[in-house]
Amino acid sequence: MLDVAVIEEPAAAEASLDPIRSRILAALAEPDSAATQAVRLGLTRQKANHHLKELKRHGLVELVGERRRGNFSERVYRATAASYVISPSALTSVSPDPSQFPDQLSARWLLALGARLVQEVGALLTSASRTRKRVAAFALAVEVRFASAADRTAFTDQLAQAVTALISRYHDESAPGGRRYRMIVGLHQIPDAQHGVPDSRGDRIPGDARTRT
C-alpha cells in the first residue's frame, strides 16, 4: 500500500468522491470484505460489491486474497493507498494555469502554483511506479511567526534575494545531460483553527494600498 496516491482520471476522481465509496476507501486501509463493509454501512451485500468493483476498476482498491467464512469463501480487498490526492489533471478544462496571472503577492497565484505542483509531482509518481524508480525531490515545511507585517515583508524580500543568489550559482542552462527542476517557495498564513479565516492584521502588505487575494 502506498502512503499517498494521486488520482489523475476524472472517472476515478468521481468514484473517490462518492460519499459511500470514500467511506469504504477509508475503512479499507485494513483488508476487509464486501460482506463486512455491507454490515458496517447498512448496505446490501450486492450494493457493497458494486461499490467495491467500481473502486477496483479505477485502481483505488485491490484484491489481496480470499478467506473462508462458514461454508462460503469471500474476497478480501484493500485500498491501494492510505490517502489520495486528486490531481488538477482530473479537471483539465478548468485547472489553473499559473502563467496566466503571475503575482508574487497573490494567494490565488500561490494556490495555482500548488495545483501545478500536485499535477506535476503526481505525473512523476505515476510514471515512477510503472518503472519502479524513485522520484528525486526535496521539501521543507516550517512555521514562522512574525511580530509585524513589516517583518514579514522584510523576510520575504531577503528570502527572494537568497534564493535568487543560489539559483544564479547553480543554474547551468547549457550543462550536457542536465535536468530541469521546478522550485516553488511559498508563504501563507496558517488558517485559524476554529474559523479558518485570516487574521485581519495580515491582510495588507506595507506600502501597497490593495489587499492581495
Image (spheres, grey):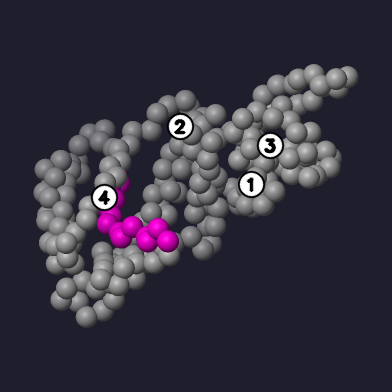
Neighbourhood count class around disc 2 (C-alpha, 10 Å): few under 14, some 14–19, many 20 upward: few
Neighbourhood count class around disc 3 (C-alpha, 10 Å): few under 14, some 14–19, many 20 upward: some
Front position among marks 1 and 2: 1
Could you tell me residue 116's position as x and y percent?
40, 53
Separation of residues labelled 1 and 2 (CA atoms):
26 Å
Q: Is residue 58 above or below residue 100?
A: above
Identify the mark at residue 22; answer none if there is no mark. Answer: 1
Q: Are marks 1 and 3 in contact (CB under 8 Å)?
A: no
Regarding residue 76, the answer to whether it shows in the image is yes
Neighbourhood count class around disc 4 (C-alpha, 10 Å): few under 14, some 14–19, many 20 upward: few
Q: Are marks 3 and 2 in contact (CB under 8 Å)?
A: no
Between 205 and 106, the one nearer to me in the picture:
205
Tag 3 secondary structure: helix
Front position among marks 4 and 1: 4
Separation of residues labelled 3 and 2 (CA atoms):
21 Å
Which residue is the site of mark 2?
128
Could you tell me residue 199's position as x and y percent?
31, 68
- Residue drawn at (39%, 49%), measured in percent from left and top? 117
Which residue is the site of mark 4?
143
Image quarter of the C terminus: bottom left
Between 78 and 135, the one nearer to me in the picture:
78
Which residue is the site of mark 3?
56
Tag 4 secondary structure: loop
